[in-house]
């Protein structure tokens, strides 16, 4: 059964062949959402430890979550929207990854300092 | 070998419009971003080896799988793969495993910080929770 809905003057459809793909993409977005929650919990519980690097991770993760969401939209969107979602998806992933990288690097530097003192 | 590749790839795509080029540029940038992350992880693992058992290895595997996903993404801009649904599913499953590994990595990093800083990080909520638990 093809589930169809009408949006922005076009027909969007979730074809039976795309069910597993769409579900996988939504689970990916959910997985990154869990990471975001963990990062926020770390920030709330250990403000001193995460003062350096934590903010980048908190800002960066939503971009990666949005990558998953756009991936899903790309699967169900009409053909002329696919290329827009494809580009949006990679732009968001790029921004998210750079922020993640900067955050992790700063955390590593910071924790290296902490354990040197101990 | 040639036969296998031909069965796999339906036809090659020659990028024609500016949207195609924009797409290729953006997707190549994500490949570069994963390479950047790989360098970051290697530096982090050298700088704080104590984190290797508490999340760094998982981050490394996340980056490797993510890199494979991004490369597959760029590749299918140039080649139309026969059963596209399966190809897309393959790409997505790679990223799904990467996401699961990242969750595990962050969870281990979280539990490690909890053990290490549980009572020490003043001003945070951790101390209050520790105090209320019997």
Image (cartoon, coloured by chain):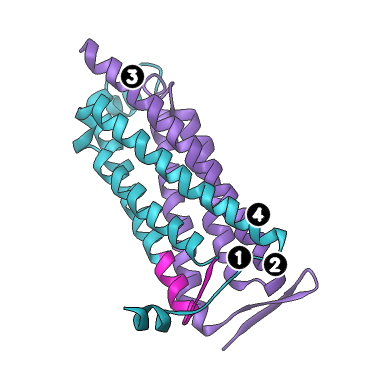
> Do the dots labelled 1 and 3 sit on one chain?
no
Residue A89 sits in quarter: bottom right
Mark carried by residue B121: 3
Q: Colour of chain A?
A: purple
Magenta residues?
Answer: B78-92
> Do the dots labelled 2 and 1 sit on one chain?
yes
What secondary structure characterizes most of the magenta part? helix
Taking the spot 40% from the left edge, 17% from the top edge, the residue there is: B123
Instruction: Give the spatial CA distance, label 3 vs label 2.
Output: 48 Å
The answer to whether one can see residue B77 in this image is: yes
Say if mark 2 contacts mark 1, CB within 8 Å.
yes
Residue marked by disc 2: A81
- Whether the magenta-drawn stretch holds residue A11 is answered as no
Say if mark 3 contacts mark 4, CB within 8 Å.
no
Task: Please report whichever mark, 2 or 1, sits nearer to the chain's N-terminal start.
Answer: 1
Say if mark 1 contacts mark 4, CB within 8 Å.
no
Give how far across and how far down residue A11 sits, in percent. Answer: 72, 78
Q: Most extreme residue toward the top, as rendered?
A: A117
Q: Chain of mark 2?
A: A
- Whether the magenta-drawn stretch holds residue B79 is answered as yes
Residue marked by disc 1: A73
Residue A94 left/right relative to B18: left
Give how far across and how far down residue B90 sits, in percent. Answer: 40, 70
Q: Most extreme residue toward the right, as rendered?
A: A9
Quadrant including the N terminus of chain A: bottom right
Task: Please report whichever mark, 3 or 4, sits nearer to the chain's N-terminal start.
Answer: 4
Shown in cyan, the chain is B
Q: Chain of mark 4?
A: B
Residue B96 left/right relative to B28: left
Taking the spot 35% from the left edge, 40% from the top edge, the residue there is: B38
Task: Please tell me whether mark 4 sits on a helix, a strand or a loop.
Answer: helix
> Do the dots labelled 1 and 4 sit on one chain?
no
């Amino acid at each position: 059964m093809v589930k169809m809905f009408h949006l922005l003057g076009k027909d969007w459809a979730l074809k039976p062949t795309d069910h597993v793909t769409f579900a996988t993409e939504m689970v990916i977005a959910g997985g990154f959402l869990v990471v975001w929650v963990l990062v926020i919990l770390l920030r709330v519980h250990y403000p001193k430890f995460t003062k350096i690097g934590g903010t980048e991770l908190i800002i960066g993760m939503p971009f990666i979550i949005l990558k998953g969401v756009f991936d899903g939209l790309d699967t169900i969107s009409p053909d002329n929207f696919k290329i827009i979602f494809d580009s949006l998806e990679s732009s968001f992933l790029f921004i998210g990854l750079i922020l993640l990288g900067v955050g992790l690097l700063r955390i590593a530097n910071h924790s290296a300092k902490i354990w040197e003192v101990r | 070998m040639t036969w296998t590749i031909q069965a796999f790839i339906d036809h090659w795509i020659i990028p024609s419009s500016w949207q195609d080029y924009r797409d290729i540029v953006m997707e190549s940038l994500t490949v570069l971003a994963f390479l950047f992350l790989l360098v970051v992880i290697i530096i982090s693992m050298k700088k704080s080896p104590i984190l290797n058992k508490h999340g760094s290895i998982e981050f490394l595997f996340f980056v490797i799988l993510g890199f494979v996903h991004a490369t597959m993404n760029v590749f299918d801009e140039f080649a139309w793969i026969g059963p596209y649904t399966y190809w897309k599913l393959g790409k997505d499953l790679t990223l799904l495993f990467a996401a699961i590994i990242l969750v595990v990595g962050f969870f281990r990093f979280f539990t490690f910080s909890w053990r290490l800083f549980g009572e020490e990080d003043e001003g945070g909520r951790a101390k209050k929770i520790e105090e209320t638990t019997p």
